[in-house]
Amino acid sequence: MANWKQLSDQYGWSADCTPNGELITTDKIRLVGAIFNGATVDTNFWTSAVSTGTVTQASSELVLTSGTANGHYARLYSVRRADWVTGTSNKFRCQARFESSDNDVTVRFGVGWGATMPTITDGAYFKLVGSTLSVNTMAATSETSVASGSFNGSYAAPTLTNNNTYEILYTLGKVYFLINNVIIHTATFATTHWTSGTTNFHVFADVNNTGDSSAIKHIFRMMNICRLGNFKTKPTYKYISGEATTVCKLGGGLLHAIVVNQAGTLCTIYDQTSAAVPIMGIVDTNKTTGVIGSISYECPFFNGLTLVTTGAGTNITVIYE
């Protein structure tokens, strides 16, 4: 198309215009994470784990404090996971500062996942050991670490005691690390994937004492993951008849609706890859006490989608993506 125009930004990333001169734009959708209001950690959105260390909140800042002996830690991660949609990219963003540092204390923050959270087996994150910063990716517990002296972008060491903005923009082939809106390093993965378990991640942060040091504080003003682009895919459906346990999807998505075509007893909906908690809802499909017809959910799920139907006469259609 001869009239198609392409622009680029300060990073060298391209932007497109239509033949009519209209800039093609996309929305930024927050998936997980939130600002820290007040003095109480909101357990609806955040999960913490500590061993002598502490996770507290004060003056709308989250504070992770290490213990003072080898093996002590404080960890935080988002309850939900940020799902991945092919054709878009996700961005982690946080504002953080450090009151002090110690070579016996390791601080990590970024995106991560593990089957037994808060243990991370896959992800991308910043790491600070003492005052030495590195950027890291992890696949199946194998960490690839690049120290600040080997960054391939524009890097000027930030004042760690000041509030700085840290970002990780990740696609399937590259992971970009930014500080204060400047790309400090780009990790490229031409032959092997940078993650082995999933591309659906939690926001996480942890501080671990690997020796015997004073307590070190890691302070956040916000942490989140956003999708750069709307969740717009063509939904699919699954027809379920009779009593059954049906796994509709492995991983995150959106449950649009459940259509009860014929009466049964119950339909239990799990945000999981099996009939295990958490439960999203229980639909009464009895023709006398329940509902026959379409029930709108428009509800995201984060781990998977599994339905358990009871009643021999059950006949439903589930619509999801």
Image (spheres, helix red, strand yellow):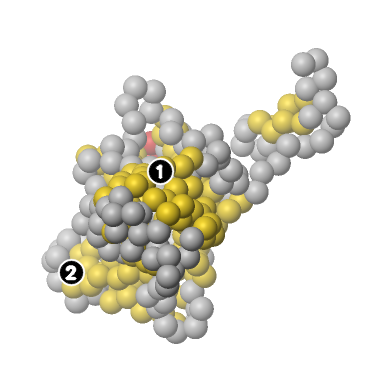
**Residue that sits furthest to the right in the current view:** 20
| Place of residue 152 in the rendered image (x, y in percent of width and height, measured from the top left) | 45, 34
Is residue 316 in view?
Answer: yes
Packing grade of label 1 (10 A; few <14, some 14-19, many >=20) is: few
Question: What kind of residue is marked 1?
Answer: Tyr
> Which element carries disc 2, helix, strand or loop?
loop
Tell which of 81 and 150 is nearer to you. Answer: 81
Tell which of 102 and 89 is nearer to you. Answer: 89
Numbered mark located on residue 72 in the image = 2
Numbered mark located on residue 27 in the image = none
Q: Is residue 315 left or right of residue 88?
A: left
The residue to which callout 1 is attached is 239
Residue 127 in the image: above or below residue 53:
above
Between circles 2 and 1, the one closer to the viewer is 1
| Place of residue 103 in the rendered image (x, y in percent of width and height, measured from the top left) | 25, 59
Is residue 304 in view?
Answer: no
| Place of residue 66 in the rendered image (x, y in percent of width and height, measured from the top left) | 26, 71
> Which element carries disc 1, helix, strand or loop?
strand
Cα separation, mark 2 vs mark 1, equals: 50 Å
Residue 151 found in image quarter: top left
Q: Please name the residue shown 68% across and 37% down the image.
A: 9
Residue 283 in the image: above or below residue 272:
below
Screen quadrant of the N terminus: top right
